[in-house]
Image (spheres, helix red, strand yellow):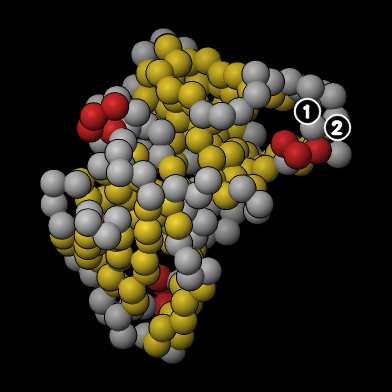
């Protein structure tokens, strides 16, 4: 039962353009969402997060949008840079209400390639 | 500030053996969580320790166990290794508050032959 889905296994974007990575979830108890970036042979690196009381959060070139009614979140990277090429994971937890903030459920990842 | 460290980085074992992996969290962090990453199942939550107590647990068999010490360092143990236990084992630390961001270490690559 895949509770967090990233339906695009890969995405290619030109340098300078916008990258949009999507994530869908099915568990309505999820109330905290995170995006991580991962390079091969390294651990995931935290990028940005959003709680269910918000619908948007920005940090520099990264913006996360949350649509609770659609159970959908997206990560926008503007402008995309070659160093952004990596695998991006979205993750969710039901921390606020159930005390299990530490139990992250991950999507399967989207490989982003930013081309010159 | 030093990040999460994991030792060893690589490990080769044979079926039936047991293995212990170690994780040192970021200074000040009291929560340590463990995850398994495999090509087939992706990243899956194993368990979390907070103040030396297991606070949350994933859906893994009892062969997977852990503990946390008073300095917040954590160890994970896998007994009676199976071929399917070959994976990247990641540990993440956080302050332990609700909806707290977890920061990951580089992982330990375990290969079971």
| Chain under disc 2 | B
Residue carrying label 1: B81
Between B94 and B83, the one nearer to me in the picture: B83
Task: Assign the C terminus of chain A to one quadrant of the image.
Answer: bottom left
Marks 1 and 2, how far apart at CA: 7 Å
Between A63 and A82, the one nearer to me in the picture: A63
Between A75 and A38, the one nearer to me in the picture: A75
**Residue name at image x 25 percent, y 66 percent:** A62
**Residue name at image x 37 percent, y 69 percent:** A21
Q: Is residue A56 found left or right of B30 in the rendered image? A: left
Give coordinates of residue A41: x percent, y percent. Answer: 59, 53
Total labels: the figure holds: 2
Q: Is residue B60 found left or right of B103 in the rendered image? A: right
Q: Is residue B52 found left or right of B86 in the rendered image? A: left
Rendering quarter of residue B9: top right
Question: Are the two marked residues, 1 and 2, in contact with CB atoms closer than 8 angstroms?
Answer: yes
User: What element does badge 1 sit on?
Assistant: loop
| Chain under disc 1 | B
User: What element does badge 2 sit on?
Assistant: loop
Rendering quarter of residue B107: top right
Residue B14 is labelled as 2
Q: State which mark lies toward you, 1 or 2.
A: 1
- Marks 1 and 2 on same chain: yes
Whether residue B71 is visible, yes or no, is no
**Residue name at image x 53 percent, y 52 percent:** A42
Q: Is residue A85 found left or right of A21 in the rendered image? A: right
In the rendered view, tell whether residue B35 sits above or below residue A68.
above
């Amino acid at each position: 039962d895949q509770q967090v889905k990233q339906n695009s296994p890969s995405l290619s974007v030109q340098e300078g353009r916008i990258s949009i990575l999507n994530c869908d979830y099915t568990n309505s108890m999820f109330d905290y969402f995170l995006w991580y970036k991962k390079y091969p042979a390294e651990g995931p690196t935290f990028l940005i997060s959003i709680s269910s009381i918000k619908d948007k959060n920005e940090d520099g070139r990264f913006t996360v949008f949350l649509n609770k009614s659609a159970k959908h979140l997206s990560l926008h990277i503007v402008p995309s840079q070659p160093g952004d090429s990596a695998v991006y994971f979205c993750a969710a937890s039901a921390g606020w209400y159930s005390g299990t903030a530490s139990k992250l459920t991950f999507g399967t990842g989207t490989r982003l390639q930013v081309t010159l | 500030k030093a990040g999460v460290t994991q030792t060893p980085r690589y490990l080769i074992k044979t079926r039936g053996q047991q293995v212990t992996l170690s994780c040192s969290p970021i200074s000040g962090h009291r929560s340590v969580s463990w995850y398994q990453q495999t090509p087939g199942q992706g990243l899956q939550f194993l368990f979390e320790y907070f103040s030396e107590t297991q606070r949350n647990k994933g859906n893994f068999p009892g062969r997977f166990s852990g503990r946390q010490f008073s300095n917040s360092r954590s160890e994970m143990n896998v007994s009676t290794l199976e071929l399917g236990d070959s994976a990247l084992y990641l540990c993440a630390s956080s302050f332990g508050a609700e909806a707290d961001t977890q920061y990951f270490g580089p992982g330990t690559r375990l290969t079971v032959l």
